[in-house]
Amino acid sequence: MIALLLRDLRLAIRAGGGFGLGLAFFLLVAVIVPLGVGPEPATLAKIAPGILWVGALLSCLLSLDRIFALDFEDGSLDLLATSPLPMEGAVAIKALAHWLVTGLPLVLAAPVLGVLLNLPVPGYLWLVISLALGTPALSIIGAFGAALTVGLKRGGLLMSLLVLPLYMPTLIFGAEVVKRGAAGMAVATPLALLAAITAGALALLPIASAAALRVNLR
Amino acid sequence: MSIWEYANPKKFMQTSGVLLPWVTALAVLALGVGLIWGFFFTPDADRFGSTVKIIYLHVPAAMMAISAWTMMLVTSLIWLVRRHHVSALAAKAAAPIGLMFTVIGLVTGAIWGQPMWGTWWAWDPRLTAFLILALFYLGYIALWAAVENPDTAADLTSVLAIVGSVFAFLSRYAVLFWNQGLHQGASLSLDEKENVSDVYWLPLVVCIVGFVLLFVTLVLIRTRTEIRSRRLQALLTRERLA
């Protein structure tokens, strides 16, 4: 399992792996929105939590097809399927690698972009916490979408259509945490619900993803 | 004699062929009676005027939108567990119908909301949850259309139906958290003394029965079409090989 994780990380970081592209996209979203909405600090402060969460979600979505597609093409996914490692474990590890490469940098970069969007000061802590809790769910749900569409030639758009509705609860609770945190209100309830979604997705979705992968490898 | 006999396509075609005209006639009858009764023979409501009559389309369509997804979930589970092709095809057949019911629910709601709430659309929890349900239907239909091998498609869409059900359910309650609603409470529920008043209640029940029958009719027709097209494919393949 650790070998698989290291392999995926190495592949992602080396040239052509797309490491950092998601981060750059996140940055661009944060730059584009004020250009479209206007620079008034009050407006930006109001929409900052939502924009940051939507941006994180979209940059996560961008890199999802990399989770399985390349391995499916060169046949290493078949090798993984026949290895002693259960498919569920392989899915979880690959989602973890995706999170380390995409989700974690987003969590670290989010406060900087919060400055660009004039996020109110009490919101920063909750922004980082909610993204740290929520982005693993984005990766594991995304891995499910990637597993469903891995055999398709032009699966990218279809995958967005499948994955985005699944992202909605995570987005709602995540953005709610930041919004309440920024307004100085209590955040315990949405935070607990966000954590519940992440925990539930981590526990159950690898099983569904593995089932979908087995069908696609048949 | 068990329900699994109808998993045999031949048996299913025979029985559904016999049932179909009857179900169709009953659906037409119930819808005709319910809608005409509702539209022309109920009084205008105090606060709502004649706009109240749109509930005869809105409520049954909304109920069937959810029921159709539930039916797809059950048939998907049957396909995954027992691998009966008719079951998978019934799920495939139900999806566009469910989507249409969802759209009817949303559109009639918008038409009603414009004069009553003063807006075509509000990000009300129920409305939002329905929009999300429509997106789930779209994704499900798109996945069926995208995968070439029919068995693979049936497997993948079944898994999606199961996961989608969980997330659609979560979204339903997540949006409650996210915004307060404009939408009124349930029109019909079993545990309340008075829902809508009796003059509206009876034709509404007739309409709901009519929509259920309409759904059954459409699913039967579409499932029969799917079975026939599957048979046609098999015949064409056989001919090519011969």
Image (cartoon, rainbow, N blue to C red):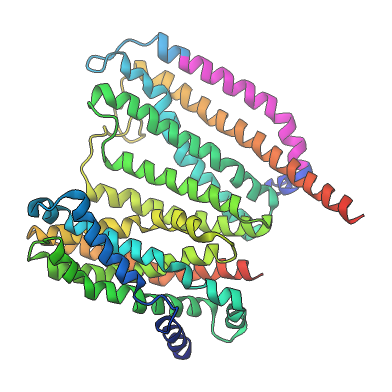
Question: Is B33 within the magenta?
Answer: yes
**Residue B185 on image: x %, y %:** 28, 34
User: Where, by quadrant of the figure, is residue A96 drawn?
Assistant: bottom left
Is residue B83 visible in the rendered image? The answer is no
| Residue in view at x 55 percent, y 43 percent | B95
**Residue B94 on image: x %, y %:** 57, 41
Is residue B180 visible in the rendered image? The answer is yes
Compared with residue A134, is residue B106 higher up or lower down, i.e. above or below?
above
Question: Is A186 within the magenta?
Answer: no
| Residue in view at x 36 percent, y 78 percent | A101
Task: Provide the residue span drawn in magenta.
Answer: B11-35
| Residue in view at x 69 percent, y 24 percent | B21
Left-right relation of B133 to B87: left
Left-right relation of A41 to B106: left
**Residue A197 on image: x %, y %:** 33, 64
Compared with residue B142, is residue A211 higher up or lower down, i.e. above or below?
below
User: Where, by quadrant of the figure, is residue A198 drawn?
Assistant: bottom left
Residue A152 or residue A13, whichever sits in front = A13
